Image (spheres, coloured by chain):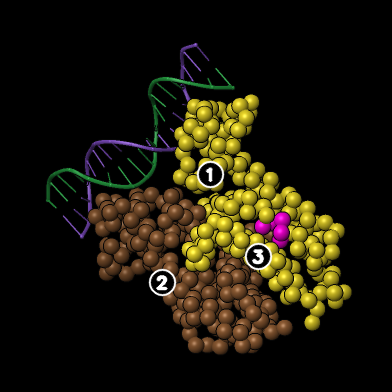
Chain colours: A yellow, B brown, C green, D purple
Amino acid sequence: MSKNKNTEQKIFEAATELFIEKGVDRTSVRDIASKAGINLALMNYYFRSKENLFDAIFSDLVNKNTQDLLQILNSDLELSDKVKKYVSAYIDMLTKNPLLVSFFMAILHRSREKITEIDAISNLYATEKFTQQIIEEGKKGSIRKTDPSHFFVDMISMITFPFAIKPLIMDKNALDEKAFDQFIEERKSHITQMVLRCIEPC
Amino acid sequence: MSKNKNTEQKIFEAATELFIEKGVDRTSVRDIASKAGINLALMNYYFRSKENLFDAIFSDLVNKNTQDLLQILNSDLELSDKVKKYVSAYIDMLTKNPLLVSFFMAILHRSREKITEIDAISNLYATEKFTQQIIEEGKKGSIRKTDPSHFFVDMISMITFPFAIKPLIMDKNALDEKAFDQFIEERKSHITQMVLRCIEPC
DNA sequence: GTCTATAACGGGATAGAC
DNA sequence: GTCTATCCCGTTATAGAC
């Protein structure tokens, strides 16, 4: 945006947008150079290759968009407040970046061999505190005994998957962009109530 | 497999496997021809282009793998039996084709502009009968009043999403293939119980 | 650091013989 | 129908001048 950004940053940002929008394999380095307003040789000067640039971008995207969410999970909040806040913050983040899930899924298919070697990925599931909380409250009896793995998978499935299939949901229910956002907004309380109801003590 | 298969079929099957395994954009027509044991010119003789071949394959994959599931949803089964059977059949299908969700998600990112123009896609949500059932049972009071759109999205999210993030689940929980299948198998009853519990009358 | 020019390759698609 | 040969284009990456 600003003219004062250095070249490396301009390349990085242009590539980020294009990768998310068109996909890595359908974005050429010429596209990137053109969007960044520089020559394509500079791309190779700053990043050694397209794949290298992609690795950097992907790690950055993961880091940037998961820090706040992780902080919530590992906070000292009471469980139901934590779930409510997590669901809401997650959905807000994805609403601001509506293609992020879809892009991430595409990468998970494209690069599944190397995906777990990316350092930033462990950020996605550094949920020890949250896990412990569920186990301990289960022991205390304040919630039903719950498998934290399934519980976590349930939550992120219901939060993120609708973004991945957004075009299908819009088509099926004849929604425009605004109505889709409304549908997603409804899911905040829907998901929260749902997962909390299922761990209520018997 | 059999030597008697005609060429068109051999191309179709080779391409299907490669597309699912490596992704459409990372599969070349030379890869396809080689795997099918024919020359690449034949690919263009039978299908006009790679993109055309892909369209045919994608529609076929959707049709082939959703018919049984749709039949369950639109059957006369009682709601809780229907959900149980649907969840189980869906998970069985995906367990047999473990890359299908991931591939489908990648396509949903790659081809999201044209995805809803594909005829076979409407198969995915021809769920009128199921929808009606939820509304009517809600009115009768045999279940809680439930928004069928959210209910359906919840179900397919919890069923399918774990397959899309399989490498992450395996890494986080230190699972091998067998343990992952076990985790998925557990989800059959887990998901069924969860969604049914949430529509129990108040 | 930034550019132009180009190398080196692989891609999809087609012509034309058989 | 099936093949070989080839076209033509876009791709990533690099060499080398400034």
Tag 2: Cα neighbours inside 10 Å, few (<14), some, or many (≥20)? Answer: few
Q: Which mark is residue B29?
A: none
Which one is closest to the eye, mark 3 or mark 1? 3
Q: Which chain does tag 1 point to?
A: A
Q: Residue at x 62, y 83 (%)?
A: B138
Is A90 part of what is drawn in magenta?
yes
> Residue A185 in the image: x percent, y percent?
65, 61
Q: Residue at x 54, y 56 (%)?
A: A177
Q: Position of residue A85 (x, y in %)?
A: 76, 59
Q: Is residue A72 above or below residue C9?
A: below
Please tell me whether mark 3 sits on a helix, a strand or a loop: helix
Question: Quick one: SS at disc 2?
Answer: helix
Q: Nearer the viewer, residue B24 or B179?
A: B24
Amino acid type, mark 2: Lys
Is any atom of residue B174 visible in this view? no
Residue at (48%, 77%) from the top-left corner?
Answer: B128
Prevailing secondary structure of the magenta residues = helix
Q: Nearer the viewer, residue A193 or B75?
A: A193
Q: Which quadrant would the C terminus of chain B be assigned to in this image?
A: bottom right
Question: What x and y, as percent, mark residue B28?
Answer: 38, 49
Identified by mark 1, the residue type is Phe
Q: Which residue is mark 1?
A: A19
Labelled disc at residue A187:
3
Residue A153 in picture, x, y percent from top left: 67, 65
Q: Which mark lies nearer to you, 2 or 3?
A: 3
Q: Which residues are magenta?
A: A87-91
Residue at mark 2: B64
